[in-house]
Image (spheres, rainbow, N blue to C red):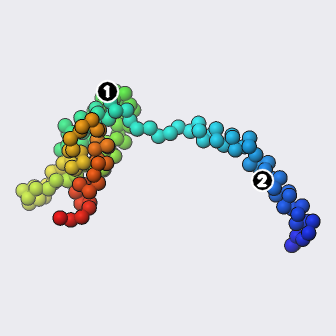
Amino acid sequence: PLLKGTQLADKIEELKRNVKRKYSTQAVEELHRECANKRRRANLPESARAILEAWFSDNTEHPYPNERQKAELALRANISDTQVSNWFVNVRKRYWRPHTTATSARKGKAKYALGPAWDKPASGLLLLERARLSELERPGIGPSR
């Protein structure tokens, strides 16, 4: 049924009261507190990244640590095994590039190397910061020469 006149005005006032009650200052503050209590994603500590980067750099031919090595790295870096695993998955996906030479291509084998983003001089920057310096230097990205 279509509301008219005072019925419409009463219905509007009722809706306003419901909205005010539902979204009162107290309710909004409670939502804000709830959101503020949720943990924010944090990056790994610099010391942990340095340990993982060193292992990765030393093992570019096969950068897949076994379970014992992951546990050892986690202990040394003071992080969880899951964090170690996730770090390796991400860094292999982002920076580990196949490097095929003419000889290895004929044999059907690809050698692997780190992309140019990894090889930049550190100058105090860690892996992720170095990688962000130039997206265009990555193989397969950017204008062809």
Residue type of the residue flagged with mark 2: Val
Badge 2 crowding class, 10 Å Cα cut-off, few under 14, some 14 to 19, many 20 or more, is few
Give the quadrant of residue 101: bottom left
Q: Is residue 119 visible?
A: yes
Taking 75 as reference, is 104 left or right?
A: left
Q: Is residue 107 visible?
A: no
At x 16%, y 53%, the residue is 99
At x 14%, y 56%, the residue is 100
Where is residue 19? Give x, y as percent: 77, 53
Taking 113 as reference, is 82 left or right?
A: right
Q: Which badge, 2 or 1, is on the more N-terminal residue?
A: 2
At x 83%, y 52%, the residue is 17
At x 28%, y 44%, the residue is 130
Between label 2 and label 1, give the one nearer the viewer.
Answer: 2
Taking 41 as reference, is 31 left or right?
A: right
Vertical comparison of 119 with 19: above or below: above
The quarter in which the N terminus is drawn is: bottom right
Instruction: Give the Cα distance between marks 2 and 1.
Output: 54 Å
Give the quadrant of residue 91: top left
Vertical comparison of 16 with 114: above or below: below
| SS at badge 1 | helix
Which residue does the numbered mark 1 point to in the structure image? Answer: 76
Residue type of the residue flagged with mark 1: Arg
Residue 40, numbered circle: none
Please tell me how many numbered marks the rendered image carries.
2
Where is residue 82? Give x, y as percent: 39, 37
Vertical comparison of 120 with 105: above or below: above
Vertical comparison of 15 with 66: above or below: below
Where is residue 13? Give x, y as percent: 86, 58
Which residue does the numbered mark 2 point to in the structure image? Answer: 19
Badge 1 crowding class, 10 Å Cα cut-off, few under 14, some 14 to 19, many 20 or more, is few
